[in-house]
Image (tube, rainbow, N blue to C red):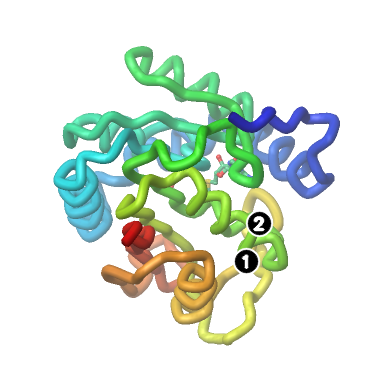
Amino acid sequence: MRTRVSAVTEPSVLNDTKTAYDSVATLYAELFGDVLKIKPMERALLAVFAELVQAHGAGPVADIGCGPGHVTAHMHALGSVTFGIDLSSEMISLARHAHPGLRFDEGSMTALDIADGVLGGILALYSVIHTPPAQVPAVFTEFERVLAPGGHLLLGFFAGDDALPQEFDHKVTLAYRWSPDSLANLLRQAGFVEVARLLREPQEGERFQQAHLLVRKHQEP
Ligand SMILES: C[S@@+](CC[C@H](N)C(=O)[O-])C[C@H]1O[C@@H](n2cnc3c(N)ncnc32)[C@H](O)[C@@H]1O
């Protein structure tokens, strides 16, 4: 097991992200806690993800950057053993309050307190968007480390057209849009095989195209 990175040793960008989400956690939960109800394509993708993870039978799902835990709870309702992890203690506190039967831990995707190869799946929905681009390959390597061979990762993010990640004026804190091809390349370099991708147009109230990449960790020979 890895030693949990303490707040004192976190790079400043993690502290800034944590502070920013701590300060908006209640509002975020009010605005987005029910958002899956109006996102049929995301619900369909989560159902596919749950089915693939359960068919493989390789371990629980970690919802990394889970926010107030609404997707964690949705996965649980789909029959997947799922727990949430988030940098923001306020988000974790709201998630525990809203979903008392589920497990939520404070932690960072940059150094997960999870043993090698134990997860059947990882959800990272709009959470890697806050990672400085130079650190994203290391985060994908960390995801690959904790997934079992053949385990699935579903990554959600705001799509951009440029080959290079584009910083944008996210309402909470510094964030980046990525082209699906650029992130797919980084995932391939980290040891993942692409299974599917979804690119959809913005719905009412959204500014950008929304992208999801579904990938699988290489099976051992
Ligand atoms: C835009 S919210 C997305 C929440 C949820 N996944 C959803 O789809 O609504 C981003 C979340 O990622 C968390 N986050 C950002 N960087 C993180 C990191 N390095 N490790 C864990 N969580 C992180 C934030 O605290 C925040 O709760």
Above or below, comparing residue 179 to residue 150 in the picture: below
Identified at 43% across, 63% down, the residue is 206
Q: Position of residue 192 (x, y in %)?
A: 41, 65
Badge 1 marks a residue whose secondary structure is: strand
Is 119 or 117 nearer to us in this picture?
Answer: 117
Picture disc at residue 131: 2
Q: Quadrant of residue 198?
A: bottom left
Identified at 26% across, 37% down, the residue is 75
Verify CB contact (< 8 Å) between mark 2 and mark 1.
yes
Badge 2 marks a residue whose secondary structure is: loop
Q: Amino acid at mark 1?
A: Tyr
Q: Quadrant of the C terminus?
A: bottom left
Is 170 or 119 nearer to us in this picture?
Answer: 119
Picture disc at residue 176: 1
Taking 129 as reference, is 47 left or right?
left
Between disc 2 and disc 1, whose residue precedes? 2
Is 91 or 63 nearer to us in this picture?
Answer: 63
Q: Amino acid at mark 2?
A: Thr
